[in-house]
Image: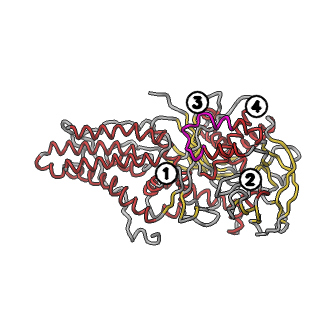
Amino acid sequence: MAPAKKILVGVAWPYCNGEKHIGQIAGAYLPPDIFARYQRMVGNDVLMVSGSDTHGTPIVLKADAEGITPEAVVEKYHTLFIDGCLQMGITFDLYTHTETQNHWDVTQMMFKRHMATGYIYRDTQNQLYDPEAKRFLADRYVEGTCPFCGYPEARGDQCDNCGRLYDALELKNPRSKITGNTQLEIRATEHFFLDMGKMNQPLLDWIYTGKEDWRPNVLNFARGQLELRELRGRAITRDIDWGIPIPVEGVPDTKRIYVWYDAVIGYLSAAVEWANLTGESEAWRAWWDNSVNPDSLIYNFIGKDNIPFHCIIWPGMLIGYNAGPEPHLNLPYDVPANEYLTLGAGKFSTSRGNVIGWNTVLEQFQADAWRYVLTAQAPETADVEFTWQDFMDRINNELVANWGNLVNRMLSFTYKRFNGTVPTPGSLDAASQQLLDEIQAGFTTVGELYNTTKLKAALTEVRRLSQRVNQYLNDKAPWKAINDDPAGAATSVYVALQAIDWLKLLWSPILPHSSEQIHQMLGYDAPLFGRQYTEEISDGRGTHRVLRYEHGAASGHWVANPLPAGQAMREPKALFVKLDETNMHGWI
């Protein structure tokens, strides 16, 4: 057996500014969980981390809109996201947030390291100033028309439509999001800059080395951005009174490290926090420290709007860090970014109220139903439109009709006609052996699709294998044969149960809840997966709630072990709820 790989799954840090929508889940939060579950099952050492971004401007804007403090917004929506993860089964080894002493310490360490390596410098720049609000406008406090594609609602640092990065001064028709004022002034202010010009050539060398397996949409965008124009210094501080203090003597407290610099550092700081929680404070190095483990694989799962930050800015920051003495940090191995899941003709947007709330729909529909549909519709290489009709059709015609009915009819038939035990098979005929060989081969073929983050293709292949079992049963018809040929019926029932037992594993990264249910109904005692739980953590900045995952027995399950004949089963129950006008009322 090959030695276990160290795989860090870094998941995009969401703003705490509202209930997350299904577009975000499909793009950035469900895919890494499917990937991480598979990697744990094959025995790799996975560390999946993320957290709530508490420093983003959208949080302040949300607080203003709701008439509460930014701290109250963070507490409300950080908790809501954790609750959604628990219900959906998103298995973070640690989900934390950026308002922790640990994150502040790691961010300030990175800042000082960049100062020491010459990747941060001080300079004066012009910025937009709102005389009505009497304040400089940080990037997300201003909107306008994109200078590249003409999108009229572009943000102050990046366009949601074309993905390009720019300076807020390049916006056309800029307006303040605080007051709506369009008569903005340009004033000079001193800031610290990340010297991205130094990163341009090292980033080009990196992005053209060993990236053949990256998704074309990610690779082409990153290469295009680096080749299109030379990178230049980018201010990493702002005139604001919230966020992480600048660790330089004499800098006024009215200037802070800005969110786009500190948020991506969360992948490192969360690993450090996780290590401290385990009692082994240096354990994070097995994933991050190049001198300890240069073969660690770091994946960053994001939506396409985050490609510039994860393929240019974050690896550039790591290159700047590594310009100093050891320890050096590993750069990302892959950035499997998704395109957008759209709603009608528009993009889902929390800040603009164009959403189908994740927590809201989890109260009405099964978590595995969502996991199935959002994987089947995964916008891996192109935008995909979500419709409620498609949601219902996929649940009824694919998940229920194919997999759910297969499991229900076979386990129910076996439990009733074979006294609640797995029957003992006789000799297998060619059709039975061929079916089992084909399902067993899925551990390689489907596993490779999971491993290369082709999750939609993995679902399609497991669904095809499930249908093969349905075809086999239609041919064997054990419910008819049991009267005339009970031994033959027992054999075909066993073959079908064995296939279901293996398919349960092939489905389990996508459908963990129902796979665990099948596992128990087939009579296994040890759980298939580990346990999610929350903790209250206290540090120098207060108490915060984190989400954690106890791996349990999941490691090593990606094996086609034989189903024990004679094993006592548990009473079967239907896996999935079929949808109709009653339970779809209000949505379709």
Q: Nearer the viewer, residue 343 or 263?
A: 343
Q: Position of residue 189 (x, y in %)?
A: 87, 54
Instruction: Report which residue position mark 2 lands on.
Output: 166
- First along the sequence among labels 4 and 3: 3
Mark 3 residue type: Asp
- First along the sequence among labels 1 and 2: 1
- First along the sequence among labels 1 and 3: 1
Q: Is residue 189 left or right of residue 516?
A: right
Image vertical order of residue 556 relative to residue 500, above or below: above
- Magenta span has 218? yes
Judged from the image, the secondary structure of the residue bearing numbered disc 3 is: loop
What residue is rendered at 81% in x and 44% in y? 247
Residue 308 appears anywhere in the view: yes
Instruction: Report which residue position mark 3 lands on.
Output: 295
- First along the sequence among labels 4 and 1: 1
Mark 1 residue type: Gly
Mark 2 residue type: Tyr
Q: Position of residue 317 (x, y in %)?
A: 72, 40
Instruction: Report which residue position mark 1 lands on.
Output: 89
Which callout, 4 or 2, points to the residue nearer the camera?
A: 2
Residue 10 appears anywhere in the view: no
Magenta stretch in the rendered image: 204-219
| Mark 2 Cα shell of 10 Å, populated few (<14), some (14-19), many (≥20) | some
Q: CA distance from mark 4 to mark 1?
A: 40 Å
What residue is rendered at 62% in x and 56% in y? 78
Judged from the image, the secondary structure of the residue bearing numbered disc 2 is: loop
Q: Quadrant of residue 573?
A: bottom left
Q: Nearer the viewer, residue 417 or 539?
A: 417
- First along the sequence among labels 4 and 2: 2
Instruction: Report which residue position mark 4 lands on.
Output: 324
